[in-house]
């Protein structure tokens, strides 16, 4: 049966059996991608990443696909939103961009999903103080998105606090409102 798989060695095998016979683990289902022009990015587990391919004049996103089953991808304008799973893994996001004449090119992102992604960034912790029930608006400058290899087109899509007695709401793509709730004795 012909069901191509890409081996960990970068070679395409007719199927998983052929790869196993060669002693090679299967990286993903499908033919191996040309990785000579791949955008390498790192994303935390269970987060949303926004990937906006560079577009030539008259071109737009035609299709997109991921090689890791289970993640959620969705087109938003000429960008693709990639929702990573809660575990660590690697994936390829292939975005096909075409013009009206049918001329196309692929933009490929090699995405590493890992808790260590945040360790790659040299961020200064931003401190803000507030009294209980006094809202503050925070518009953090995400230094993580300025790191080499990270798509600079980002938007704040998910906010989480490790303190459970608070209220957090997103205002727009760059800011959120944080309200602390007083402890009851």
Image (cartoon, rainbow, N blue to C red):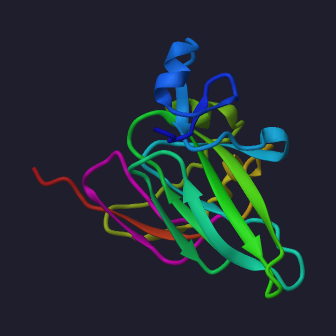
Total numbered labels:
0
Residue 31, placed above or below residue 158:
above
Asked whether residue 113 is in view, the answer is no
Q: Relative to the observer, which residue lies in front, 38 or 13? A: 13
Q: Residue at x 71, y 43 (%)?
A: 33
Q: Residue furthest right?
A: 57
The kind of secondary structure the magenta stretch mainly shows is: loop
Identity of the residue furthest to the front in this view: 1
Percent position (x, y) of residue 84? 46, 49
Residue 96: percent from left, percent from top: 70, 66
| 170 in the magenta segment | yes
Q: Is residue 163 visible?
A: yes
Q: Where 9 falls versus 124 (above or below)?
A: above
Residue farthest toward the top in the current orientation of the protein? 23
Q: Left of 1 or right of it: where is 118?
A: right
Q: Position of residue 169 (x, y in %)?
A: 39, 71
Q: Residue at x 88, y 75 (%)?
A: 56
- Going 53% across and 58% down the picture, which residue do you hit? 82
Name the residue nearer the viewer: 63 or 127: 63
Q: Is residue 4 left or right of residue 103?
A: left
Most foreground residue, 159 or 78: 78
Q: Position of residue 167 (x, y in %)?
A: 32, 65
Magenta stretch contains residue 43: no
What is the magenta range?
A: 154-173
Q: Residue at x 24, y 58 (%)?
A: 182
């Amino acid at each position: 049966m012909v069901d191509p798989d890409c081996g960990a060695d970068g070679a395409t095998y007719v199927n998983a059996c052929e790869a196993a016979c060669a002693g090679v683990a299967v990286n993903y289902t499908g033919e191996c991608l040309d990785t000579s022009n791949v955008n390498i990015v790192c994303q935390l587990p269970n987060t949303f990443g926004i990937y906006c391919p560079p577009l030539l004049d008259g071109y737009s996103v035609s299709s997109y696909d991921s090689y890791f089953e289970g993640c959620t991808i969705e087109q938003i304008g000429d960008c693709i939103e990639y929702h990573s799973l809660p575990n660590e893994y690697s994936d390829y996001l292939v975005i096909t961009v075409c013009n009206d004449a049918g001329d196309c090119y692929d933009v490929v992102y090699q995405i590493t999903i890992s808790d260590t992604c945040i360790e790659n960034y040299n961020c200064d912790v931003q401190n803000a103080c507030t009294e209980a029930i006094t809202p503050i608006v925070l518009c953090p400058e995400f230094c993580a998105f300025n790191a080499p290899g990270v798509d600079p087109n980002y938007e704040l899509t998910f906010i989480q606090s490790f303190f459970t007695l608070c209220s957090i709401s997103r205002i727009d793509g760059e800011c959120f409102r944080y309200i602390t709730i007083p402890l009851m004795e």
